[in-house]
Image: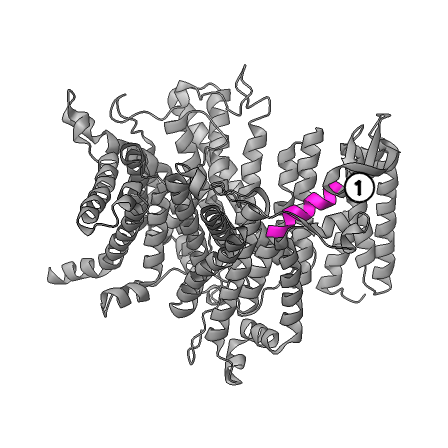
């Protein structure tokens, strides 16, 4: 018998695990649910909470249906696997089915605002997407960025303070990227110029930004709140025509300017990284700086520039926490988003598309957790909160394919010096 | 003799200059964020007077809160004036243990960001054995400590297992496991077995008196036997690293994993063992913190010990003795910072800034060399973790 490749072995293992989970869902959520109550899926329009349409399904029937669908997905995936084709479709069906089977069971007798779930998920994913794009820019050019959290927090703090003092949200929006870039300049200077270990450096920069913002928050923002920390916030802008599309419109096209900027940045990075000279050079200094140097690319200059751009991106994302939503700044309000963004980047295998999908997934999981704990379900919310972190551990331990960082990620480059 | 002094000067100069620079920069921050100072910023004479007194008062309060406060001796013995020092050591005790955990992992080439999670599991284990069972005093303390060690070493060892089996990077895995541990303690404190009777807030019952670590200087000082455990642990780590085969293997893998492999050392086993022992040390920190100081488990039991432990290890250059010294310094900063906040309304959080700056300067000797124009500043090899693919 021919030996299976590692990748195929992993796919098979993943399919088997998914199948087992679906069987478990069938037994526990489908047949194990003796309640006669139903789950209501509501399609709600935007933030106006008008129920457009609702789907009522008996919980146990719904769970059984989705679990069976999931098993079908697994079967499909296996079939494609045998035919040596990609089993992605089957895997997707199986994964989504498990989720719905679970929701049907968890929300027995309750109302689930389906569109609200998606909308809230996107809202929670916005800073994660900004953060992971920052990480992507750095790490693709060979600089490890653990300081995403610090960049986000610096952006959030600066934008709130400037918007409060000047009463102008626009100025807050301008200062946020600069604050993020300031953290980046430190990261770039110490990492690229002084050759300090980048993981340690990123960690220390986070501590520094936490310390600075905590200190100034207590020193100035609390005692003089009316001048320092009463920032106005952006209101939503509905895009004509696009905003009127049912379901999708209010989710994606009735947002603040920061979210629209995010679309633009994501598009620019995804395009730029793979379709422009800059992108090619960036990837080459991240993978093989010696080769890049030999064709005349100034490795450290390009790295420096990209790290600063990354800071601009993450800093802007930080503004979403303050002037993009609640206005004023709260102590340590990023609450680990930078680390989840890092997780999303790794989960997405250092690609823009992967990172965005992972960020959306984490945002959705977080929001699902919030929704379920509000409507009061039997699953402890703490376990739901663990999901993104467990998913990341599973991802990095190679269950869903090998995750490989850019080859020269975190490696100090100095001309004529071997390492 | 001269040579000896030169060596001290060489090795201590970088940390010393780093600490001084961190204090100066943070001092400027304290001064320029002070409302009273900002009010007189227009007139140079007044400004210098107010600014320097703000600067001095903050740091004097920090010192008094960390080491010796003459006000406390009034009507009491001189010893009572050292109450702040006792508090410093109490704070430093779990920091030493968690710091040793990070240091040991560093020596083996692993960056253990997971001390926080390991600390939490150590605290959970010690707390449960402490309040749930009844034993005679010495036995009870020992068993409670062991429970913490075992739980935490499993939690830490899992990271090593994953790394050895699948190559999952310990930095990512430990960051994620810290969050998981944080949510786990929130959950477990809501369960029946951990909820204090007739209470609904997340607070475990107090441990039984038989499980408490004894006080060392009578009941007026909170100094407890945990510091002895921490110092013993430091000696143990030193012995392990320098006097045993296992320790040699740890350092060999840390210095050059592929060379170690060629020499016949199993990198996987070493990684697992390192993370297990690192977990045990951080867990011991959590256990000691519960049994000697807090007595009851809360969701915030780990505070920022696990994260401070990383700065402690970095400042201590991952050496046992350095780690102890660094933990004492940071313990002093934290303890004194509280007095500083109370007396001069300078937020305690400045301590984080000081810590971060110290480590930043120490990690980049090139910068310190540049600022002070010192040509041959010894850096003793900067610490390095391994990139994602390492």
Q: Which of the image's four quarters has the N terminus of chain A?
A: bottom right
Q: Position of residue A130 (x, y in %)?
A: 59, 56
Q: Is residue B326 in view?
A: yes
| Residue B303, quarter of picture | top left
Residue beneath the point at 73% across and 65% down: A5
Task: From the viewer's perspective, tell me whether residue A142 is left or right of residue B357.
Answer: right
Where B230 falls versus A378 (above or below)?
Answer: below
Q: Is residue B168 in view?
A: no
Q: Position of residue A214 (x, y in %)?
A: 42, 43
A124 within the magenta span: yes
Residue beneath the point at 59% across and 45% down: A325
Q: How packed is label 1: few (under 14 Cα within 10 Å), some, or many (20 or more)?
A: some
Q: Residue furthest left?
A: B1
Q: Position of residue A49 (x, y in %)?
A: 76, 37
Instruction: Write the start and end of the magenta stretch as one range.
Output: A116-127
Q: Nearer the viewer, residue A337 or A225?
A: A225
| Residue A104, quarter of picture | top right
Task: From the viewer's perspective, tell me whether residue A333 is left or right of residue A74.
Answer: left
Q: Which residue is mark 1?
A: A100
Q: Nearer the viewer, residue A92 or B160?
A: A92
Number of marks in the rendered image: 1
Q: Chain of mark 1?
A: A
Task: From the viewer's perspective, tell me whether residue B389 is left or right of residue B61.
Answer: right
């Amino acid at each position: 018998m021919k030996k299976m490749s590692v990748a195929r072995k992993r796919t098979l293992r993943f399919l088997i695990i998914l199948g087992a989970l679906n069987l478990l869902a069938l037994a526990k959520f489908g047949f194990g649910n003796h309640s006669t109550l139903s789950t209501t899926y509501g399609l709600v329009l935007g933030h106006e909470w008008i129920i457009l349409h609702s789907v009522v399904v008996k919980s146990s029937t719904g769970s059984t249906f989705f679990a069976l669908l999931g098993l079908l997905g697994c079967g499909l995936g296996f079939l494609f696997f045998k035919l040596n084709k990609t089993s992605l479709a089957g895997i997707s069906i199986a994964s989504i089915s498990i989720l719905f089977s679970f929701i049907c069971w968890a929300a027995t007798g309750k109302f689930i605002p389906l569109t609200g779930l998606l909308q809230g998920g996107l809202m929670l994913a916005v800073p994660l997407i900004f953060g992971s794009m920052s990480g992507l820019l750095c790490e693709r050019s060979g600089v490890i960025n653990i300081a995403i959290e610090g960049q986000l927090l610096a952006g959030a703090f600066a934008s709130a303070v400037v918007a409060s003092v000047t009463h102008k949200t626009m100025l807050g929006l301008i200062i946020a990227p600069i604050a993020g870039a300031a953290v980046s300049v430190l990261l770039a200077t110490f990492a690229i110029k002084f050759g300090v270990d980048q993981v340690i450096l990123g960690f220390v920069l986070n501590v520094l930004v936490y310390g600075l913002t905590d200190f100034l928050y207590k020193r100035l923002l609390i005692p003089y709140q009316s001048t320092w920390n009463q920032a106005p916030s952006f209101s939503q802008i509905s895009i004509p025509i696009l905003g009127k599309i049912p379901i999708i419109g209010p989710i994606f096209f009735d947002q603040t300017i920061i979210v629209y900027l995010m679309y633009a940045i994501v598009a620019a990075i995804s395009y730029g990284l793979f379709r422009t000279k800059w992108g090619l050079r960036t990837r080459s200094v991240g993978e093989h700086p010696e080769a890049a140097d030999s064709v005349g690319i100034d490795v450290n200059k390009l790295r420096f520039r990209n790290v600063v751009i990354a800071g601009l991106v993450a800093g802007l994302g930080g503004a979403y926490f303050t002037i993009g939503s609640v206005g004023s700044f709260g102590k340590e309000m990023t609450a680990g988003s930078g680390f989840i963004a890092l997780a999303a980047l790794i989960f997405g295998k250092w690609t823009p598309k992967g990172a965005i999908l992972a960020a959306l997934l984490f945002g959705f999981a977080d929001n699902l957790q919030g929704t379920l704990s509000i409507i009061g379900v039997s699953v402890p919310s703490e376990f739901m909160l663990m999901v993104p972190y467990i998913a990341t551990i599973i991802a990095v331990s190679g269950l869903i394919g090998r995750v490989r960082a850019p080859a020269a990620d975190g490696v100090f480059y100095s001309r004529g010096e071997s390492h | 003799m001269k040579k000896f002094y030169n060596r001290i000067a060489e090795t201590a100069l970088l940390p010393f200059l780093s600490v001084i620079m961190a204090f100066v920069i943070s001092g400027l921050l304290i001064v320029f964020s002070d409302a009273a100072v900002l009010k007189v910023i227009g007139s140079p004479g007044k400004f210098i007077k107010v600014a320097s007194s703000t600067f001095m008062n903050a740091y004097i309060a920090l010192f008094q809160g960390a080491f010796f406060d003459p006000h406390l001796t009034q009507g009491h013995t001189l010893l009572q004036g050292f109450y702040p020092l006792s508090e410093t050591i109490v704070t430093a005790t779990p920091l030493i243990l968690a710091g040793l955990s990070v240091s040991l992992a560093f020596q083996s080439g692993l960056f253990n960001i997971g001390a926080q999670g390991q600390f939490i599991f150590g605290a959970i284990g010690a707390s449960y054995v402490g309040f749930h069972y009844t034993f005679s005093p010495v036995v009870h303390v020992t068993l409670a400590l062991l429970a913490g060690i075992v739980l935490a070493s499993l939690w830490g060892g899992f990271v090593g297992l994953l790394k050895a089996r699948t190559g999952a990077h310990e930095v990512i895995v430990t960051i994620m496991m810290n969050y998981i541990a944080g949510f786990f303690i929130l959950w477990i404190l809501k369960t029946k077995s951990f909820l204090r009777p007739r209470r609904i807030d997340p607070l475990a019952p107090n441990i039984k008196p038989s499980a408490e670590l004894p006080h060392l200087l009578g009941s007026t000082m909170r100094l407890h036997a945990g510091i002895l455990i921490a110092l013993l642990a430091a000696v143990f780590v030193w012995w392990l690293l320098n006097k045993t085969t296992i320790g040699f293997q740890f350092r060999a893998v840390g210095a050059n994993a592929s060379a170690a492999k060629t020499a016949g050392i199993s990198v996987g086993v070493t990684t697992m063992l390192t993370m297990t022992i690192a977990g045990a040390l951080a867990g011991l920190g959590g256990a000691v913190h519960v049994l000697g100081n807090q007595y009851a488990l809360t969701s915030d039991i780990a505070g920022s010990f696990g994260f401070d432990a990383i700065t402690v290890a970095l400042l201590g250059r991952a050496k046992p003795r350095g780690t102890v010294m660094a933990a004492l310094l940071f313990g002093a900063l934290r303890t004194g910072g509280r007095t500083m906040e109370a007396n001069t309304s300078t937020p305690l959080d400045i301590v984080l800034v000081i810590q971060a700056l110290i480590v930043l300067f120490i990690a980049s000797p090139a910068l310190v060399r540049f600022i002070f124009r010192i040509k041959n500043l010894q850096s003793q090899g900067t610490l390095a973790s391994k990139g994602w693919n390492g």
